[in-house]
């Protein structure tokens, strides 16, 4: 019988604690803190994410029930809902944002060779946002509409492993297209976006930085055709054209030529018109790339389903951002564990298993790889066996 450490303690081993300490010192997170450190706060919030806790009282009750085991998983301070609420409200959220970026960097290295369905030697990103509705009376700083509050989680995600590499949390009024200004564009990379990011002045910055964008056009798109290329219509392609913008302002904002590709999807019975500044990729590859953009929608659905980012343990802006960044770090941590332990289960299955065995004393690899020893003989060294069965 395994008599080692609990699963939660084994899971924490995958966290680079020294780098978390650097993030804490950078923002003086533990200044004048005696009993409940930033690491204690992180572990309590990570526990809440993994085990689907609903409130601060829920976290406090569950952790106090496991009081003898808390020290062994790294929680040194006394867990209290008031202490945790105060920590979420006052300790700078950038501590956990910086730490999440460290985990993201590690995960991207592990998934650098991951296949996402298209054989390309370039880095491919999907850019989108998701809206989280809030109560205006409780979150007055997150104004969205007259009687409604909301925040947006703008995300740039690499398709190799579905790892988010850039996240910006804003109030609901910030338009998606403004986030392009905050991106550090990578030369040679491919960025896939929906029609919400169709701003030709901003799209021209992709061309100036030698980056590729793939997006869709709007219904009132005004252009003139310069050249066209033959396409195989049996593949769903309808046209492959070189165009130039006609509008007075749009032609000034984007003075270069563009590539317009028409595609008919038999599965959905819909026609799509794509725009890109890349003339080297095959037209069918461009259409397939845009279809891969759906991975970021799956990512948003996953974190809303398996993590706690729709109900919050605090109402201040700092508390909300702290909770979201810790949730993102838990997602990336599970992805790291999956890759390093070579687990075949999905991320959702891994998180579901961890939620019920977090305080069990079993090897984490045994739990997640389903290599349970069904016929293992339990040996009790406190009493001698009378018969050898």
Image: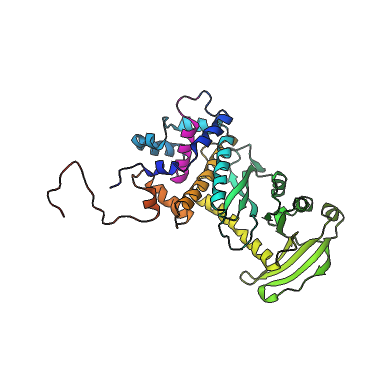
Q: Pick whichever, 245 or 4, lies toward us.
A: 4
Say above or below: 104 vs 125. above
- 270 sits to left or right of 351: right
Q: Which residues are magenta?
A: 33-54
Res 13 visible: yes
Q: Pick whichever, 138 or 219, lies toward us.
A: 219
- 270 sits to left or right of 35: right
At x 61%, y 51%, the residue is 157
In this view, the residue farthest toward the right is 248
Say above or below: 40 vs 207. above
- 317 sits to left or right of 216: left
In this view, the residue farthest toward the top is 32
Q: Position of residue 28 (x, y in %)?
A: 56, 28
Q: Quadrant of the C terminus?
A: bottom left
- 127 sits to left or right of 366: right
At x 52%, y 47%, the residue is 332
Q: Position of residue 337 (x, y in %)?
A: 47, 49
């Amino acid at each position: 019988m395994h008599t080692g450490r609990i699963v939660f303690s084994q899971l924490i081993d995958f966290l680079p604690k020294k780098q978390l300490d650097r993030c804490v010192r950078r923002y003086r997170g533990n200044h004048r803190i005696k009993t409940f450190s930033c690491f204690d706060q992180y572990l309590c919030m990570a526990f809440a994410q993994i085990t689907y806790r609903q409130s601060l009282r829920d976290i406090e009750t569950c952790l106090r029930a496991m009081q003898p085991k808390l020290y062994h998983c790294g929680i040194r301070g006394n867990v209290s809902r008031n202490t945790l609420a105060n920590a979420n409200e006052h300790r700078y959220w950038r501590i956990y944002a910086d730490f999440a970026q460290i985990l993201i960097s590690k995960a991207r290295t592990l998934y650098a060779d991951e296949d996402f369905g298209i054989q390309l030697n370039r880095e491919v990103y999907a850019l989108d946002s998701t809206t989280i509705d809030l109560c205006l009376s409780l979150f007055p700083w997150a104004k969205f509409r007259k009687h409604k509050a909301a925040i947006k989680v703008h995300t740039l995600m690499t398709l190799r492993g579905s790892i988010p590499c850039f996240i910006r949390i804003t109030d609901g009024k910030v338009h998606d297209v403004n986030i392009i200004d905050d991106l550090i564009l990578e030369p040679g990379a491919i960025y896939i976006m929906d029609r919400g990011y169709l701003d030709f002045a901003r799209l021209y910055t992709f061309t100036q930085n030698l980056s590729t964008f793939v997006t869709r056009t709007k219904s009132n798109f005004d252009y003139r055709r310069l050249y066209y290329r033959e396409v195989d219509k049996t593949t769903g392609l309808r046209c492959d054209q070189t165009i130039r913008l006609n509008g007075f302002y749009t032609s000034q904002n984007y003075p270069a030529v563009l590539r317009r590709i028409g595609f008919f999807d038999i599965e959905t019975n819909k026609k799509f018109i794509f725009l890109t500044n890349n003339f080297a990729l095959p037209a069918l590859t461009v259409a397939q790339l845009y279809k891969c953009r759906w991975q970021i929608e799956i990512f948003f659905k996953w974190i809303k389903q398996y993590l706690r980012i729709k109900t919050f343990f605090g109402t201040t802006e700092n508390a909300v951002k702290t909770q979201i960044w810790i949730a993102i770090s838990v997602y990336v941590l599970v992805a790291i564990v999956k890759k390093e332990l070579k687990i075949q289960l999905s991320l959702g299955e891994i998180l579901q298993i961890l939620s019920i065995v977090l305080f069990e004393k079993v090897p984490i690899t045994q739990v997640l790889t389903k290599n349970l020893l069904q016929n293992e003989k339990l040996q009790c060294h406190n009493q001698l066996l009378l018969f050898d069965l």
